């Protein structure tokens, strides 16, 4: 397990601890919390800050890069190039907006909206709208909202006739006609990335613009996709490790048995997420219990 994964696992374990941690020694008793993290906990409890974190925060270049990478469409390499060219803030970015690609322009336009968490009540309204409108487009669609909402922004679609052309396009165009999808970042035959916004209802509430991804998945890959996109990242890694231990290879598309030579066999039949857990002999866990 790498340094980042170790820290994330420790953070998850600490977050679930039912009591306030009073010392690094106490934290070390938890699975995944080592000596270095325990030292940082003691330092934070004693001073209210971490020297290493303060150094990073005081590093102007790192601070600017971190800010720019929060704009959807700007990765670390692009952010570093912007900083080298003197672009260090959102205001600087707005001055060169004409040089940004379409994805980056949308990210800058809705930066404040995208930074705000989506209330669960709003997600439930979005879910109800999308699933209802899927049936308007074609009753054969099946949809599942994944991501942290199920345990979300990612919606997975299934259609029994996956090879039929423009299945995903038909859904997106319908949602655009309703005014729900407001902007497109990218649109292919199996993946859509864009922006959506709920219309103002009777409560007269103005909803923010939100990022939305929609993927179209073949029926025989659907539940592997649902499992993968529900997450979390650490849970997925643990699932893949368990699968390998039991002689299978698992990804977002299929679960396959591994032969004695290590070559994957034919995909196994999967009609539910539970089937995947059964194959690798692991107790089924509800989506809400997959945040490790």
Image (tube, rainbow, N blue to C red):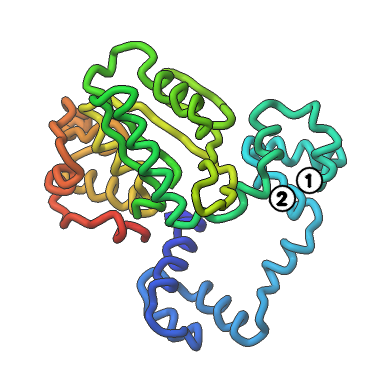
Q: Would you say 77 lies left or right of 89 here?
A: left
Please name the residue shown 46% across and 35% down the image: 213
Q: Quadrant of the C terminus?
A: bottom left
Q: Are marks 1 and 2 in contact (CB under 8 Å)?
A: yes
Element on which disc 1 rests: helix
Q: Would you say 274 lies left or right of 28 here?
A: left
Please name the residue shown 21% across and 35% down the image: 255
Mark seen at residue 67: 2
Please name the residue shown 35% across and 72% down the image: 31
Lower position in the chain sequence, tag 1 or tag 2: 2
Mark 2 neighbour class, 10 Å CA radius: few under 14, some 14 to 19, many 20 or more? some
Residue corresponding to mark 1? 90
- Between circles 1 and 2, the one closer to the viewer is 1
Residue 96 picture location, percent across and down = 83, 33
Element on which disc 2 rests: helix
Please name the residue shown 50% across and 34% down the image: 180
């Amino acid at each position: 397990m790498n340094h980042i994964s170790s820290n994330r696992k420790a953070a998850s374990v600490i977050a679930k601890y039912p009591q306030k941690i009073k010392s690094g020694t106490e934290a070390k008793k938890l699975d995944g919390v080592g000596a270095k993290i325990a030292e940082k906990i003691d330092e934070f409890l004693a001073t209210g800050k971490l020297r290493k974190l303060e150094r990073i925060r005081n590093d102007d270049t790192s601070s600017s890069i971190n800010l720019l990478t929060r704009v959807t469409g700007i990765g670390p390499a692009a952010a570093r190039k912007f900083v080298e060219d003197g672009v260090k803030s959102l205001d600087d970015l707005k001055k060169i907006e004409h040089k940004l690609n379409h994805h980056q322009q949308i990210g800058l336009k809705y930066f404040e909206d995208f930074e705000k968490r989506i209330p669960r009540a709003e997600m439930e309204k979005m879910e109800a709208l999308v699933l209802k409108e899927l049936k308007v487009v074609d009753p054969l669609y099946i949809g599942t909202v994944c991501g942290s909402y199920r345990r979300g922004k990612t919606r997975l679609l299934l259609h029994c006739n996956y090879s039929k052309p423009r299945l995903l396009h038909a859904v997106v165009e319908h949602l655009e006609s309703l005014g729900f999808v407001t902007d497109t970042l990218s649109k292919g035959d199996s993946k859509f990335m864009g922006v959506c916004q709920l219309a103002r209802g009777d409560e007269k509430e103005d909803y923010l613009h939100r990022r939305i991804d929609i993927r179209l998945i073949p029926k025989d890959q659907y539940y592997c996709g649902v499992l993968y996109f529900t997450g979390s990242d650490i849970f997925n890694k643990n699932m893949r490790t368990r699968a390998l231990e039991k002689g299978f290879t698992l990804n977002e598309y299929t679960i396959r048995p591994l032969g004695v030579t290590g070559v994957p066999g034919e995909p196994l039949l999967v009609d539910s997420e539970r089937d995947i857990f059964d194959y690798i002999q692991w107790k089924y866990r509800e989506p809400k219990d997959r945040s490790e």
